[in-house]
């Protein structure tokens, strides 16, 4: 397989990048950070580490990732968020596939297992208990859609999916407040997209959808086994569902 390019989107992620970037040097010589207006020294850190840097206005998650993919040197892309860190097993597997003499078909997409660390505790159950994300692909075969949030990888044709051993540690929410702030922003993005698609907010979506979301994460998918962290995560995710429909309702009124 040809060498991977590693594309990372970031904004004010200097601490996460400080621990992530050194781990990736053994995997690829082409690491590219796409920074969207950081003010915490992210760009300076990347420059000091002599890693590729693209500075851009925020284009939305999918479009910002696609910009990085276009700027990368190689067709094969490992796409990461700045708060995702591969464990040692995954690093080893990434090195193995890049050194393999066997050519990969361009329609191959690798799925990476992601473990969410919520307030520093790993969640083993709920909606994130068995989470696999497409993260390695050939840019001639797949690209990110243009959703503002919750972007998805879109393939240009039939694909062959493989699961890569190891785990991708996801340090997305260091605190409940951080979770609320991020979900509030996501809710506004989602509401805007739904509004553009002429979707409507109604009683069922405002109240029953959040209730179902909570029950699914906390009861059906055994989130209660994660203790207080599982309860908090399920509640805040249900709150996000309520917020996005409430924001949509406000857009309809205005």
Image: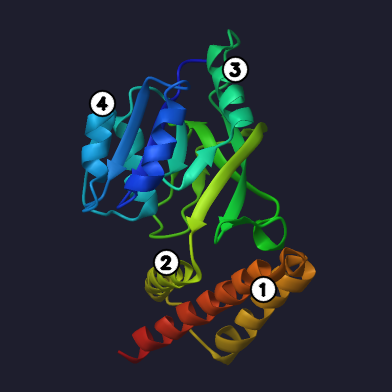
One can see residue 104 in this view? no
User: Residue 130 at what x, y percent from top left?
Assistant: 70, 51
Q: Between tags 3 and 4, which lies in front?
A: 4
Secondary element at image label 2: helix
Circle 3 residues within 10 Å: few <14, some 14–19, many ≥20: few
Q: Which residue is mark 4?
A: 50
Circle 4 residues within 10 Å: few <14, some 14–19, many ≥20: few
How far apart, in angstroms, are the residues tagged by discs 3 and 4? Answer: 24 Å
How far apart, in angstroms, are the residues tagged by discs 2 and 3? Answer: 35 Å
Which residue is at a point 54% across and 79% down the rendered structure image? 239
Q: Nearer the viewer, residue 123 or 103?
A: 123
User: Residue 127 at what x, y percent from top left?
Assistant: 67, 62
Q: Nearer the viewer, residue 187 or 174?
A: 174
Which residue is at a point 21% across and 53% down the rendered structure image? 39
| Pointer 2 or 1: first along the chain | 2
Q: Which residue is mark 1?
A: 231
Circle 2 residues within 10 Å: few <14, some 14–19, many ≥20: some
Secondary element at image label 1: helix
Which residue is at a point 48% across and 60% down the rendered structure image? 174
Q: How many marks?
A: 4
User: Residue 38 at what x, y percent from top left?
Assistant: 24, 51
How far apart, in angstroms, are the residues tagged by discs 4 and 2? Answer: 30 Å
How far apart, in angstroms, are the residues tagged by discs 1 and 4? Answer: 42 Å
| Pointer 4 or 2: first along the chain | 4
Q: Tell me which corner region of the image, top left, top right, bottom left or bottom right, holds residue 228.
A: bottom right
User: Residue 25 at what x, y percent from top left?
Assistant: 42, 23
Q: Which residue is mark 3?
A: 96
Residue 89 lies left or right of residue 153; in this view the side is right
Q: Which residue is mark 2?
A: 182
| Pointer 3 or 1: first along the chain | 3
């Amino acid at each position: 397989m040809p060498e991977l390019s590693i594309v990372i989107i970031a904004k004010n992620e200097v601490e996460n990048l400080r621990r992530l970037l050194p781990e990736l040097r053994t995997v690829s010589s082409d690491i590219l950070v796409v920074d969207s207006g950081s003010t915490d020294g992210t760009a300076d850190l990347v420059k000091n580490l002599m890693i590729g840097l693209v500075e851009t206005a925020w284009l939305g998650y999918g479009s910002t990732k696609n910009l990085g993919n276009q700027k990368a040197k190689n067709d094969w892309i490992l796409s990461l968020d700045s708060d995702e860190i591969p464990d040692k097993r995954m690093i080893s597997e990434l090195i193995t596939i890049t050194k393999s003499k066997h050519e990969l078909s361009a329609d191959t997409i690798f799925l990476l297992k992601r473990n969410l660390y919520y307030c520093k505790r790993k969640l083993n159950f709920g909606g994130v208990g068995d989470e696999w994300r497409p993260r390695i692909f050939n840019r001639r075969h797949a690209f990110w859609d243009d959703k503002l949030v919750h972007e998805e990888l879109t393939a240009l044709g039939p694909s062959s999916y493989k699961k890569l051993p190891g785990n991708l540690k996801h340090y997305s929410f260091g605190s409940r407040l951080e979770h609320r702030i991020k979900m509030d922003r996501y809710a506004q993005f989602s509401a805007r997209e739904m509004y553009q698609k002429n979707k409507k907010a109604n009683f069922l979506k405002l109240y029953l959808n959040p209730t179902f979301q909570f029950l699914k994460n906390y009861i059906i998918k055994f989130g209660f086994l994660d203790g207080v962290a599982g309860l908090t995560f399920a509640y805040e995710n249900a709150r996000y569902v309520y917020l996005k429909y409430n924001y949509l309702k406000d857009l309809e009124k205005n």
